Image: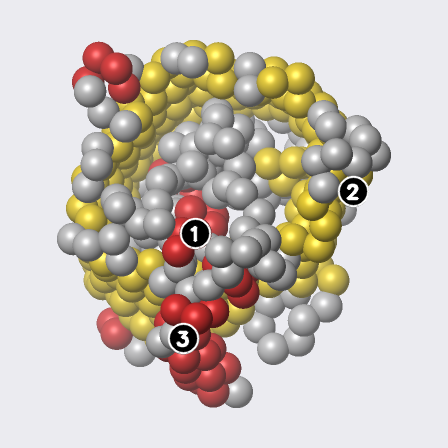
């Protein structure tokens, strides 16, 4: 069933990619453009489209335009109403363990409205994975008031962005998965009820937020605070973007909380550099553990190169260690074949991305080589490689 789903989805993507240019919006404006990209700010460190890509002239522009249900700036009550959502289908293979799986990693549906000119209301639900879609959780459920790009106040359930990969939307990742640094130091639950203010006052960016945590209920645990400050050195480097940012998290640990990691404090310094056809990402992060979790220190560096406006190559190296045994978790699919933990993890990833419609519709594929040291010798040692491929779409 999963294999059939994978083949069918890839077939649909190939069919859509070969659609004639006649599907584009007419010059008379009969078809409105797709909903615009969110403005890049510290709330979402957006990875840009591959160099030279013109989304408005894409044959997919007409299809994506149907997500915009209403748009009328002159209406004082409702200016815009759009459907929102994400879809991700993965296939993973780890030959050493004779392991392979395909699954629907993400299937989200919701809506976003802009009202009273300065308010945004966004509600989006995550449906259960694999072949039995049903309501799993609410990811986004917030109201945001935007004065201008320099100030936005958000209340409700929202993402808590820190570390390089944790600050990047899953729909805009350049690799199949976030790095194992983010998997260990970022809070992978990602969405929390809270209040935040953020802005992009060029060249400065900032984010301040307080969020609730818990386990079976969001409000039966404690809370954590997040602060980010960043500066864009683009002008000094003559680059499209050269954003250096620092994150600090204080987590009021509460035994039994499962929505946050058992980390009392997190520090992350990360750089995002983009030139016309290439770029790099770097992240050095540390965390002070609590309860049974030991302290962590990690680093990751990523580079990419756009061969064409459609084809992109990506390489990444990740290193993370704990100061005591069994303090480092495995990445997503490695954890399916190794039950234990280790104390020193290294990974090299090499991938290729094909952009059908920018980050809105892309095919990704990558090979990773990973090694975990386990000084405790209790089942966490690992050395092997794996291949992951998948389709990502968002609207």
The answer to whether the residues at label 3 and label 2 have Cβ atoms under 8 Å apart is: no
Q: For the residues marked 3 and 2, what is the alpha-carbon distance in whole angstroms? A: 47 Å
The answer to whether the residues at label 1 and label 2 have Cβ atoms under 8 Å apart is: no
Q: For the residues marked 3 and 1, what is the alpha-carbon distance in whole angstroms? A: 15 Å
In depth, the one of 319 and 164 nearer the eye is 164
Say the numbered circle drawn on residue 19: 3
Say the numbered circle drawn on residue 56: 1
* Residue 145, above or below 259: above
Seen at 63% across and 57% down, the residue is 67
Say the numbered circle drawn on residue 217: 2
In depth, the one of 394 and 3 nearer the eye is 394
In this rendering, the label closer to the viewer, 3 or 2 = 3
In this rendering, the label closer to the viewer, 1 or 2 = 1
Percent x, y of residue 354: 29, 61
In depth, the one of 283 and 288 nearer the eye is 283
Tell me if mark 3 has few (under 14), some (14-19) or many (20+) residues whose alpha carbon lies within 10 angstroms of its own.
few
Element carrying mark 2 = loop
Percent x, y of residue 198: 58, 20
Q: Earlier in the sequence, mark 3 or mark 2?
A: 3
Percent x, y of residue 88: 49, 63
Element carrying mark 1 = helix
Q: How is the image coloured?
A: secondary structure
């Amino acid at each position: 069933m999963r294999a059939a789903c994978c083949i069918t989805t890839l077939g649909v993507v190939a069919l859509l990619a070969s659609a004639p240019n006649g599907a584009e919006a007419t010059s008379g404006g009969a078809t409105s453009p797709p909903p615009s990209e969110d403005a890049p700010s510290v709330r979402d460190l957006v990875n840009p489209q591959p160099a030279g890509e013109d989304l408005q002239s894409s044959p997919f522009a007409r299809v994506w335009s149907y997500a915009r249900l209403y748009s009328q700036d002159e209406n004082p009550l409702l200016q815009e109403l759009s459907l929102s959502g994400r879809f991700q289908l993965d296939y993973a293979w780890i030959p050493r363990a004779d392991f392979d799986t395909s699954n629907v990693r993400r299937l989200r549906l919701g809506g976003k409205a802009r009202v009273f000119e300065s308010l945004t209301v966004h509600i989006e639900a995550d449906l259960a994975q694999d072949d039995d879609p049903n309501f799993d959780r609410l990811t986004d459920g917030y109201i945001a008031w935007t004065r201008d790009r320099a100030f936005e106040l958000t209340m409700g359930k929202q993402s808590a962005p820190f570390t390089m990969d944790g600050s990047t939307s899953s729909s805009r990742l350049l690799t199949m998965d976030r790095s194992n640094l983010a998997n260990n130091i970022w809070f992978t639950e990602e969405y929390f009820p809270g209040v935040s203010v953020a802005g992009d006052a060029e060249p400065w960016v900032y984010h301040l937020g307080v969020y609730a945590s818990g386990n079976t209920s969001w409000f039966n645990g404690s809370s954590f605070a997040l602060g980010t400050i960043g500066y864009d050195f683009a002008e000094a480097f003559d680059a499209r973007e050269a954003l250096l940012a620092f994150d600090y998290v204080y987590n009021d640990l509460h035994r039994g909380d499962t929505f946050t990691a058992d980390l009392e404090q997190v520090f992350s310094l990360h750089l995002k550099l983009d030139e016309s056809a290439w770029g790099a990402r770097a992240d050095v992060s540390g965390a002070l553990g609590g309860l049974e979790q030991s302290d962590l220190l990690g680093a990751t560096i990523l580079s990419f190169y756009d061969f064409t406006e459609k084809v992109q190559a990506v390489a990444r190296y990740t290193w993370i260690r704990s100061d005591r045994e069994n303090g480092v978790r495995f990445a997503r699919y490695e954890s399916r074949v190794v039950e234990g933990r280790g104390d020193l993890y290294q990974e090299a990833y090499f991938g290729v991305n094909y952009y059908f419609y920018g980050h809105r519709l892309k095919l990704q594929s990558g090979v990773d080589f990973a090694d975990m040291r386990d000084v405790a010798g209790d089942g966490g040692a690992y050395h092997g490689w794996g291949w992951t491929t998948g389709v990502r779409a968002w609207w």
